[in-house]
């Protein structure tokens, strides 16, 4: 299975929840805390990210960066 992770710029996130809806692995959610702008920000809640980049594509403020682990040599998808 391909593994990935996301990094979210919490200070800029407005908590629109578009990334949460777009995530097929349901690994994103809103924080219980507020950022400096007064918004609940998106965060990675579960370690099930596959690096599909759906969250980054739908983010209107481009605050999400997606990283994928490199595929292991000799493995097949």
Image (cartoon, rainbow, N blue to C red):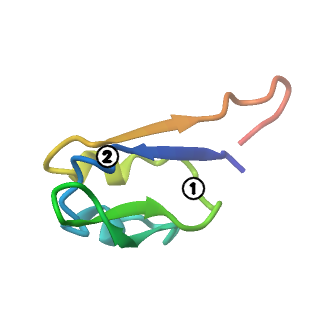
Question: Could you classify mark 2 by the number of other residues whose Cα lies within 10 Å: few (under 14), some (14-19), or many (20 or more)?
Answer: many
Q: Return the x and y of residue 52 as percentages of the image width and height.
A: 46, 48
**Mark drawn on residue 26:** none
**Front-most of residues 38 and 70:** 38
Residue to which mark 2 is pinned: 56
Residue 19: quadrant of the picture: bottom left
- At mark 2, the secondary structure is helix
Q: The C terminus is located in which quarter?
A: top right
Q: Nearer the viewer, residue 41 or 60?
A: 41
Is there a contact, CB below 8 Å, between mark 2 and mark 1?
Answer: no
Q: Quadrant of residue 16?
A: bottom left
Q: How far across and how far down the image is residue 29, in percent? A: 41, 71
Q: Residue at x 54, y 67 (%)?
A: 45
Query: What percent of the width, then of the height, locates residue 12?
Result: 21, 47
The first of marks 2 and 1 along the sequence is 1
Horizontal side of residue 2 vs 11, given as left or right: right
Residue visible at 65% across and 60% down in the picture: 47
**How many labels were placed on the picture?**
2
Q: Disc 1 designates what residue?
A: 49
For the view shown, which residue lies furthest in the front direction?
36
Q: Is residue 69 left or right of residue 53?
A: right
Give the side of residue 60 with respect to residue 2, left or right.
left
Q: What element does badge 1 sit on? A: loop
Tell me residue 65's x, y (percent).
39, 38
Q: In the depicted view, which residue is nearer to us: 56 or 29?
A: 29
Which residue occupies 52% across, 35% down? 67
Per the model, the C-alpha gap separating discs 2 and 1 is 13 Å
Residue 52 in the image: above or below residue 66: below
Which residue corresponds to the image point at 66% horizontal and 45% vertical from the top-left? 2
């Amino acid at each position: 299975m391909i593994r990935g992770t996301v990094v979210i710029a919490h200070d800029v996130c407005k908590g629109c929840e578009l990334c949460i809806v777009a995530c097929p692995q349901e690994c994103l959610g809103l924080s219980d805390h507020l950022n400096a702008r007064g918004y609940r920000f998106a965060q990675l809640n579960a370690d099930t990210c596959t690096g599909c980049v759906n969250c980054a594509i739908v983010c209107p403020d481009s605050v999400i960066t997606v990283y994928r682990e490199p595929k292991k040599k000799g493995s097949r998808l």
